[in-house]
Amino acid sequence: MACRRWISCAGKRRREPRCERIPLKDVRNIFGLGKHKAEVIISSYRKGLAKSFNIDFAAAPRKALFLQNLCDELQFDPELTSKMHEEPTDKIISSASRTGSRVIGHQVVACAIKPALIILQQYRQIIHNQSMCSGVSRVLNEDEDFLIVYSSKSSKGTLFPVRSMLVFFIALFGLYACYFSFTQIALENEEEMNGAEERTNVLCKRPSEIPYDQMQYVHFPRPMSYDRGECACTPVRFLVIISMQRSGSGWFETLLNSHPNVSSNGEIFSVRERREDIASILWTLDKLYDLDWRTSAAKNECTAAFGLKWMLNQGLMDYPDEIVDYLIKKGVMVIFLFRRNTLRRLVSVLANDHDKKEKQLNGTHKAHVHSQEEAEILARFKPEVDVSSLIPSMRSAEQSMDACLRRFRATRHMILYYEDLIRDNNALSRVQEFLGLPVRRLSSRHVKIHTSPLPDLVDNWEDVRRTLKPTEFARFLDG
């Protein structure tokens, strides 16, 4: 009966108090709107207006007065409207707070523009309502469903343009308010993250047991792929084992990995794509030393030393200056592991190349074995050494080692030789002390393949002996 009440008001040619107090929702059926759709429009209308009318317009007092009067005229309930408007905006704000990310542009626009569009629709409805109260000329038969015909006397012609301008102003101000709010939230989240990082640095970068001159080699990495949790304040040393094939590097790395706090990740640069250029190399190193390189070397204990094994022929000597600069700036500790007896190394290389082709262990190639039986099978093969290229090959190996030590001498490093690891029982303890690790007894499942004297390992030993005896390499014949 809302329509009849409006018509009754208009028929008396005046606006009675009861006509002004009719709620907007009571006339929703005048324009053929369903209950649900009308409530959605009304709710959005009130939410949009309440958002704009509650803003402090201190800089424009006349506008504030005008808007307040308009609210009184339209019979708004600011408190109720604000409660209606809280839920959708809070969802966006809480989502941004949880993710710590900035709210993207279209969310800001949607926050401000959608209420403005609803406001525009509702202004048109209000104009029609006001016209109904002031200018209804006639009503058709009672049997017809609320057919209203408006007279030519309606609201003033300038009313809609003025209100359209007001809607536009509200939309712009709402856009600014939403953008400012979301930006403030993003800044607060960023400050919280920076504050947490600073607190972590203050708490974790002052271990009293670490000498001051070694602080640049102590790190507290924060990987992106997982949370270090209780290990966040465990200092980590970055390491790299620089070596050559068949120099005992595989055995040495397994010894280090037997320590509960060490993770060395093998020859990661054996994959050619990772060493195509210096950019690929540095990107791979960054990912590794950020502790985002997940391999079987990962431990359940807190990691205190983390790194890789790098062969000279895996791009290391292609960009020595850039790599040295990176290792120094990153605070990486270098362990050089070479083999003095280049003749034994050459015999091991030839035997390994043969097994790659023949696959003597049940059709598979193994560079390292874990049983005495497998070692005996591989040791049966006696390679024939090309004596014409023997001396150049041995000199080339020594020159490569010397060049590496010379180019990387600026790094913090220690030099090891395979022969010293075998004979010196304290060599592994010195390595652990160099890495700042608690000294542990280290072990490996690797089994040495070639244990016999050299004459029993080379097929043409007499030719090799005659070739090397008059040279500086004669000292290796008894090795």
Image (tube, rainbow, N blue to C red):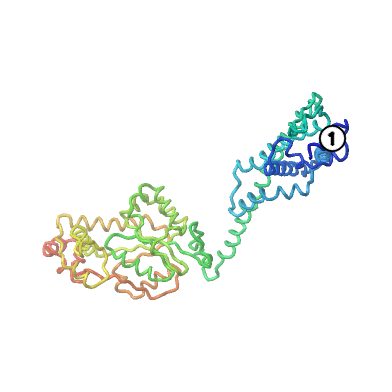
Q: Quadrant of the N terminus?
A: top right
- Farthest top residue? 152
Amino acid type of the residue tagged 1 in the rendering: Ser
- Of residue 4 and residue 389, the one placed in the foreground of this image is 4
- Farthest front residue? 143
Kindly indicate the quadrant of the structure image that contains residue 365. bottom left
Asked if residue 144 is positioned above or below residue 431 in the image, the reply reads above
Q: Residue at x 34, y 68 (%)?
A: 254
- Image coordinates of residue 69 in percent, x first then y, are 84, 38
Kindly indicate the quadrant of the structure image that contains residue 105. top right
Q: Secondary structure at mark 1?
A: helix
- Image coordinates of residue 334 in percent, x first then y, are 40, 61
Q: Quadrant of the C terminus?
A: bottom left
Q: Horizontal placement of 149 versus 201: left or right?
A: right
Q: Horizontal placement of 249 versus 172: left or right?
A: left
- Of residue 15 and residue 297, the one placed in the foreground of this image is 15
Q: Horizontal placement of 168 versus 232: left or right?
A: right
Q: Residue at x 53, y 65 (%)?
A: 229
- Of residue 217 and residue 54, the one placed in the foreground of this image is 54
Total tally of numbered discs in the picture: 1
Q: Residue at x 64, y 41 (%)?
A: 110
Q: Residue at x 51, y 67 (%)?
A: 231
- Image coordinates of residue 109 in percent, x first then y, are 64, 40
How many C-alpha atoms fall within 10 Å of the one at disc 1: few (<14), some, or many (≥20)? some
Which residue carries the number 1 mark?
Answer: 8
Asked if residue 278 is positioned above or below residue 256 in the image, the reply reads above
Asked if residue 158 is positioned above or below residue 97 in the image, the reply reads above
